[in-house]
Image: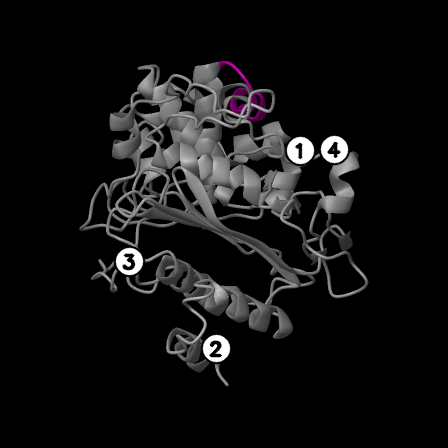
Amino acid sequence: MTPGLFLAALLLAPQDSAVNPWAALERYVEERVAARAFPGAVVAVGRRDTVLFLRAFGRLDYGAGSAVTTRTIYDIASLTKVVGLTTGLMMLADEGRLDLDAPASRYVPAFAPSGGDRVTVRHLLTHSSGLPAWRPFFEEARSRERVMALVDAAPLEAPPGTRMVYSDLGAIVLTQVVESVSGRRVDRFLEQRLMRPLGMTETRFRPPARWRARIAPTEDDPWRRRVLRGEVHDENAAAMDGISGHAGLFSTAGDLVKFARFMLAGGRAQPVSNRRTGSADRPPAPLVARATLDEFTRVQNPSLSSRALGWDTPAEGSSAGTHLSPRAYGHTGFTGTSLWIDPAQDLFIVLLTNRVHPTRENTQIFEVRRHVADLAAVAAGAPSPAPRRGP
């Protein structure tokens, strides 16, 4: 049976939905593990004030690896761009320290000669800067500073604001923007301003060796000539010592739940239960104003793309599936991850896999993401599919 027919059969099989509304989602992910779309996965679905579903599937690898648990740590790849980089930029903009419509070269002077004086921060956040999508800088650079210098010198391929090309180069320039404005390396800034306030204790760049047994391995990497486990999968991020805004974060489903609840709460960290009293602590002050968060998560130029600031929004054929509202926003990660947040339905969907293990040539994840989003949304009570914007 093809994956599409399998999904249809699940959606048309209501016999156990009254007992377990998540049964169709569970069966689908189990079937995809059996089909070797990925060795294992963790799925989390919830609302601002509750987790509706959290389950681990499969194993860490295709050998004798341990079973995946809900505390398994994944290389979240380009989810780094939104969970880390974009949120940092959002905080700096909220404080009035960052002008989204200023030239990026105001903050990164080295970017000016190659066209950075015409590229705004907003262009970079919407992937409309004109920068190339990707370059193998790791083949010639052996330091973080050298990679950044090569990115800053990369010529534009199109006038800013004229087309959308998803660009890791743009995210590396934005990494420098965060560091210039905040005065701190991006990992230290995010640890202080985001991870610590949200209690995301299992999210970080360059995870320590003591975490290794809980980390899902990624690729048998031809460049590094070993199976990667606890080392960032992205080669350019690796050449940057594992610390960049375009890739590098490792995290768990539980920590991404905390992040999603923060976003659904309009920029306010959600209280956790006090172990001594059994009651919830008083909600802390907002980390970012709701108006700023709303600006970052709305489509910026519908005639150009479905992009918000850093985030993407639902479009035809996207990983959002067909049941999320036009107000939803999300992102994917190359290693097999995705995160979608829908404020209109008070809903988040987290999918973590290591689909690149042992090789990135496995591309089943592109279909899986959409189906998981649909099955999760239906189980959570989403309405009929909404019309989608095209790119």
At label 3, which amino acid type do we have? Answer: Ala
Q: How far is disc 2 from disc 1 in space, using C-alphas? A: 39 Å
Label 2 element class: helix
Callout 1 crowding tier (Cα within 10 Å): few <14, some 14–19, many ≥20: some
Say whether disc 4 or disc 2 marks the residue closer to the N-terminus: 2
Q: Nearer the viewer, residue 374 or 277?
A: 277
Q: Is the stretch drawn in magenta largely helix, strand or loop?
A: helix
Q: How far is disc 1 from disc 3 in space, using C-alphas? A: 35 Å
Image location (x, y in percent) of residue 123: 30, 36
Q: Give the residues drawn in magenta, as a range.
A: 183-191
Rendered image: mark on residue 241: 1
Q: How far is disc 2 from disc 3 in space, using C-alphas? A: 21 Å
Question: If the image is split into quadrants, where does the C terminus sit?
Answer: bottom left
Q: How far is disc 4 from disc 1 in space, using C-alphas? A: 14 Å
Say whether disc 1 or disc 3 marks the residue closer to the N-terminus: 1
The residue identified by callout 3 is 315
The residue most toward the left is: 303
The residue identified by callout 4 is 208
Q: Is 22 positioned to the left or the right of 298 in the image?
A: right
Contact? badges 2 and 3 (CB < 8 Å): no
The residue identified by callout 2 is 3
- Vertical arrangement, residue 134 with respect to residue 371, above or below: above
| Residue 333 in view (yes/no) | no
